[in-house]
Amino acid sequence: MAATADLSAPNDLSDREREAVEALLYRLADDEFVIADRYTDWQVHAPTIESDIAIANIAQDELGHARLWYDLLEDFGYTEPDLIWERDPDTFRHSTLCELPFAEGDWADAIVRSYLYDEAEHLRLGALEGSSYPRIRDRIGKVTSEEDYHREHAENWLRRLAGGDEGRERVQDAVDRLFPHALALFEPVGEVEDDIDDLGLRTRTLEDMRAEWVETVTDTLTSIGIDVERPHVEDGQVAEEDLPEHVGRDGDHTDHWSTHFDEITNTYRELERHDATRLMEDPDDE
């Protein structure tokens, strides 16, 4: 992709530029927010004290990353209730990989999900290091350093689990269940996708990143004895039969999402709040 000039400050963007920036930010923020909350399901339930602490730290990191991206959306006049607590759940743009409940009692599900997600996140963040939107580009360093730890944690556990017959079987079950939803991380969102690329908001296309992601995760999984069926791709698009019924990026979510969203926002609604304590301090104030 050709290099492009930096975009203007938030208030000086054209309608086309703002729409593209918002589409990209919602995708980044919603993924991190929803998967962070899912990770909290494992707190005090992970197989060891060390893994319990690790998954809690990862959840906290992901929540912090969501804060970084939601904060950039606040540049356009949105408030935290607008972006999370009072938002229509159908407007969330996270992949369905992030919202699925974990297979009950199965740590392999959490590890496979983390591995598939973090390998995709690694590529996505790399494509934002040269973003034409300085507000995005300036925040990549902090997110990348923490995501590198998440990837290492997930791959180490993945290899550990696959070291025995029973663990390998559980990993295989999790891959079979989650791989199609992980492909949804790279699903395009209409015509705005071309604008994201043409404006230089990222330096690699979804198609290009998906191809590398498939190669990377397939090589890793097959090396530990896991079977992976590569998706069929035609004209740059994954065949419909290789994708889940709901992909999330277009606002079409599984039935689990409405239940999950109700749980996330329950306290806010029960207390009849109309504002909210910020998830974290504004990074620009640090």
Image (cartoon, helix red, strand yellow):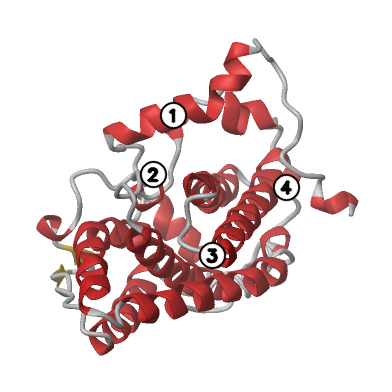
Gap in angstroms between the C-alphas marked 3 and 4: 40 Å
Gap in angstroms between the C-alphas marked 2 and 1: 12 Å
Gap in angstroms between the C-alphas marked 1 and 4: 26 Å
Mark whose residue sits in front, 1 or 4: 1
Q: Residues within 10 Å of mark 2 (few under 14, many from 20)?
A: many
Quick one: 128 or 133, which is closer to the camera?
128
Does residue 90 appear anywhere in the picture? no
* Left or right of residue 182, residue 148 in this image: right
Mark whose residue sits in front, 3 or 1: 3
Q: Residue furthest right?
A: 285
Mark whose residue sits in front, 2 or 4: 2
Gap in angstroms between the C-alphas marked 3 and 2: 21 Å
In the rendered view, tell whether residue 32 sits above or below residue 232: above
What residue would you read off at disc 1? 89
- In the structure shown, which secondary structural element does the residue marked by tag 3 occupy? helix
Callout 3 amino acid:
Ser
- In the structure shown, which secondary structural element does the residue marked by tag 1 occupy? helix
- In the structure shown, which secondary structural element does the residue marked by tag 4 occupy? helix
What residue would you read off at disc 3? 51
Callout 2 amino acid:
Glu
Residue 16 horizontal/vertical position (percent): 54, 47
What residue would you read off at disc 4? 10
What residue would you read off at disc 2? 99
Does residue 220 appear anywhere in the picture? yes
Q: Residues within 10 Å of mark 1 (few under 14, many from 20)?
A: some
Q: Which residue is painted at 58% across and 32% down in the image?
A: 84
Of the two numbered discs 3 and 2 on the same chain, state the one appearing first in sequence: 3
Q: Residues within 10 Å of mark 3 (few under 14, many from 20)?
A: some
